């Protein structure tokens, strides 16, 4: 099932980036447009501290909000380890 698109194109691009990295986007909520969930949400991933992020429907600055989403995704501890491991094995 496809999800609805975010109304701000910068935020939608960041959400596509998150999905490409394996994050799950859940649309809906009381105050937020939705949430993103880390695929590595376990004790090894900062104890779940950064494994969920809220996506605002009308952020004050869509560009900043999109950068913040990308930062959460790109700074995931286990995701960094997986990328490093894949790079090492490909150089092999």
Image: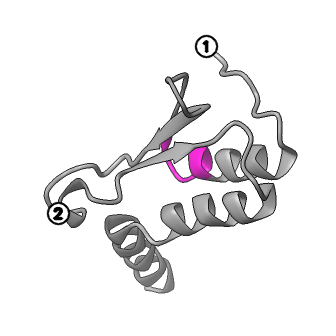
User: Looking at the picture, how far across and down is residue 44, in whole percent?
Assistant: 17, 63
Q: Which residues are magenta?
A: 18-24
Does residue 79 sit above or below 33 in this rendering? below
91 to 79, vertically: above or below = below
**How many residues crowd around disc 2 within 10 Å: few (fewer than 14), some, or many (20 or more)?**
few
Q: Is residue 40 left or right of residue 2?
A: left
Say which mark, if any, is on residue 22.
none
Seen at 43% across and 85% down, the residue is 92
The colouring scheme, among rainbow, by chain, secondary structure or one colour, is one colour
Q: Secondary structure at mark 1?
A: loop
Residue occupying the point 35% across, 59% down: 50
> Where on the picture, by quarter, is residue 60?
bottom right
Identify residue for label 1: 1
Q: Nearer the viewer, residue 91 or 68?
A: 68
In the rendered image, residue 51 lying in the magenta stretch gets the answer: no
Q: How far is disc 1 from disc 2 in space, using C-alphas?
A: 30 Å
- Residue 29 position, x and y percent, is 50, 24
Classify 10 Å Cα crowding around label 1: few (below 14), some (14-19), many (20 and above). few
Q: Residue furthest right?
A: 9
The x and y percentages for residue 84 are 42, 79
Q: Earlier in the sequence, mark 1 or mark 2?
A: 1
Q: Decide which of 59, 67 is in the foreground and name it.
A: 59
Pick the quarter of the image with the N terminus: top right
**The residue tagged with tag 2: helix, strand or loop?**
loop
The reply to whether the C-beta atoms of the residues labelled 1 and 2 are less than 8 Å apart is no
The number of callouts visible is 2
List the single residue furthest toward the top: 1
- Residue linked to disc 2: 44
What residue is shown at x 68% (from left), y 66% (from top)? 67
Relative side of 35 to 38, left or right? right
């Amino acid at each position: 099932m496809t999800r609805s698109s975010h109304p701000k194109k910068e935020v939608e691009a960041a959400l596509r980036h998150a999905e490409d990295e394996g994050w799950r986007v859940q649309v809906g909520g009381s105050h937020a447009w939705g949430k993103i969930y880390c695929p590595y949400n376990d004790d090894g991933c900062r104890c779940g501290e950064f494994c969920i992020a809220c996506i605002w429907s009308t952020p004050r600055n869509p560009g900043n909000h999109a950068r913040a989403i990308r930062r959460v995704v790109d700074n995931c501890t286990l995701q960094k380890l997986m990328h490093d491991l894949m790079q090492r094995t490909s150089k092999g």
